[in-house]
Amino acid sequence: MKNTIKVERAKKNWTQADLAKHIGVSRQGLNSIETGKFIPSTVLALRMAKVFDTTVEALFQLDDTEG
Amino acid sequence: MEQSVKIANRNSIISALIYGATYVPTVWLLKHHVFGKPVSIIIVIVPVITFSIYIFKYIKSFAVMDEVKQRVQLEAVVIGFALTVLLLMILFLLSMCGISNPRWFGYGELVGWCWLFYFVGWGISVKKYGV
């Protein structure tokens, strides 16, 4: 699973701590999501899409190998 | 929200320390002193109560963790549980062959092994998710 969280964060000039606070997770937790180690729940993905004013599909994409 | 998570985590850690602080002296007391059965049972009940409180606080803190931390705890418990069951199975089968080593694998030691396996699981999970 790929994501564009880092790009969206950079657009808003937010640190990981800023975004973490907005979506209600720990900074370490957000880092784990951003680096693709943890796949977030639908609720968290939707919350993230909402704060970035985008869609979940734009934020998260399947890898080519994932079909 | 963040404050309530911190409080829940702190309460969980404090209750774990209280449990440890009651369990170790209880084992020491029962090992080195001879008490009547009613007194022994009262002494035994103390760590049972503190452990129950710890589990209650742990479950409460689990409920307010973010989902990454919940996953880490869940995997730690799953790995700890699976390894404990594996150890129990091995000990049972060995005991059927007449092989036992209560010095390392008595009931008291099994509690220690169980905790060790939980921390092994926790370490694996923390490394996996990088938290």
Image (cartoon, helix red, strand yellow):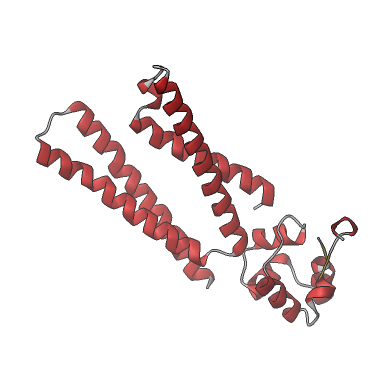
Q: Which residue is located at x 27 percent, y 46 percent? A: B47
Q: How many badges with numbers are in the image?
A: 0
Asked whether A57 or A50 is in front, the reply is A57
Farthest residue to the right: give it: A64
Quarter-of-image position of residue A55? bottom right
Tell me: B13 left or right of A8.
left
Where residue A64 sits in the image (x, y, percent)?
90, 59
Tell me: A20 left or right of B83.
right
Q: Is residue A66 above or below residue B76?
A: below
Where residue B92 sits in the image (x, y, percent)?
42, 28
Tell me: A6 left or right of A20.
right
Where residue B9 sits in the image (x, y, percent)?
46, 59
Quarter-of-image position of residue A63? bottom right
Asked whether B102 or B119 is in front, the reply is B102
Where residue B26 sits in the image (x, y, percent)?
24, 38
Q: Is residue B51 above or below residue A34?
A: above
Q: Which residue is located at x 54 percent, y 69 percent? A: B2
